[in-house]
């Protein structure tokens, strides 16, 4: 039986094969080039998470609570996970995950099934929680002039040593974040903080605040 090699094939047939191969390659390139932008956005969005820990999350150089701190993410702020992320088991059963933004590092994702991170948007099939209370929660607070006659400082993080962002005069008013919680001082000082959205986003000492009349 005679075996055929490429040199024995008719020139016309070889040319047709080359044309077909070029068409297939061109089609693949066209499909890749016309991939809908929403798919790319969805892929990027899948790495977005928001912090659920009331006290925020410390970003560390490695997946260990003793690793150097390289940043901080306040409550309900966004982080971006690295591509191919996976849970990392740390000391004492704590879970860690690597992030790419706002800075590269690792954040604690809690213990067991409890997570410190949530999706940035509602996932399909979930129902947003809608308040049915007749009287909404009063988020307005006033600086007590007796306790803070010189007003209060607004800090970037819940710590007196954190970056100063602004101030509120005595008897001035602030607006708390929804579902607010008291946050212990990051440096262990005997002070509780609370996150606010007005007059600017930040943290303010909670001990000198009173509910607005």
Image (cartoon, helix red, strand yellow):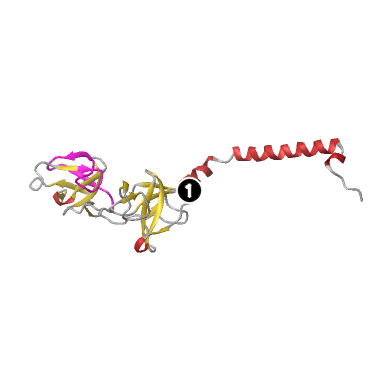
Residue occupying the point 67% across, 39% down: 27
Residue occupying the point 33% across, 52% down: 67
Residue at the far right: name it.
1
Residue at the far left: name it.
146
**Residue position marked by numbered label 1 in the rendering:** 83
Could you tell me residue 38's position as x and y percent?
A: 52, 42
Q: Does 21 sit left or right of 54 as displayed?
A: right
For residue 56, above or below residue 163: below
Visible residue check, residue 120: no
Q: Secondary structure at mark 1?
A: loop
Is residue 158 highlighted in magenta?
yes
Provide the residue span drawn in magenta.
154-178
Q: Does 82 sit left or right of 180 as displayed?
A: right
User: 61 or 137: which is nearer to us?
Assistant: 61
Label 1 environment density (alpha carbons within 10 Å; few <14, some 14–19, many ≥20)? few
Visible residue check, residue 33: yes
Corner quadrant of residue 101: top left
Is residue 93 highlighted in magenta?
no
User: 187 or 5: which is nearer to us?
Assistant: 5
User: 90 or 176: which is nearer to us?
Assistant: 90
């Amino acid at each position: 039986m005679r075996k055929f090699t490429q040199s024995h094939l008719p020139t016309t047939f070889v040319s047709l094969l080359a044309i077909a191969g070029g068409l297939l390659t061109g089609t693949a390139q066209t499909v890749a080039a016309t991939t809908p932008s929403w798919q790319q956005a969805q892929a990027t969005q899948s790495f977005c998470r928001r912090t659920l820990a009331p006290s925020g999350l410390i970003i560390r150089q490695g997946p260990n609570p003793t690793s150097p701190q390289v940043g901080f993410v306040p409550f309900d702020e966004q982080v971006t996970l690295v591509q191919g992320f996976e849970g990392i088991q740390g000391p004492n059963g704590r879970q860690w995950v690597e992030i790419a933004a706002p800075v590269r590092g690792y954040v604690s994702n809690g213990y067991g099934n409890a997570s410190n991170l949530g999706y940035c948007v509602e996932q399909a099939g979930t129902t947003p929680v809608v308040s049915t209370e007749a009287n909404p929660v009063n988020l307005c607070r006033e600086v007590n002039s007796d306790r803070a006659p010189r007003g209060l400082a607004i800090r970037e993080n819940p710590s007196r040593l954190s970056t100063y962002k602004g101030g509120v005069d005595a008897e001035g008013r602030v607006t708390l974040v929804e579902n607010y919680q008291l946050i212990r001082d990051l440096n262990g000082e005997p002070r509780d903080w609370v996150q606010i959205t007005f007059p600017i986003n930040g943290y303010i000492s909670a001990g000198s605040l009173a509910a607005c009349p």
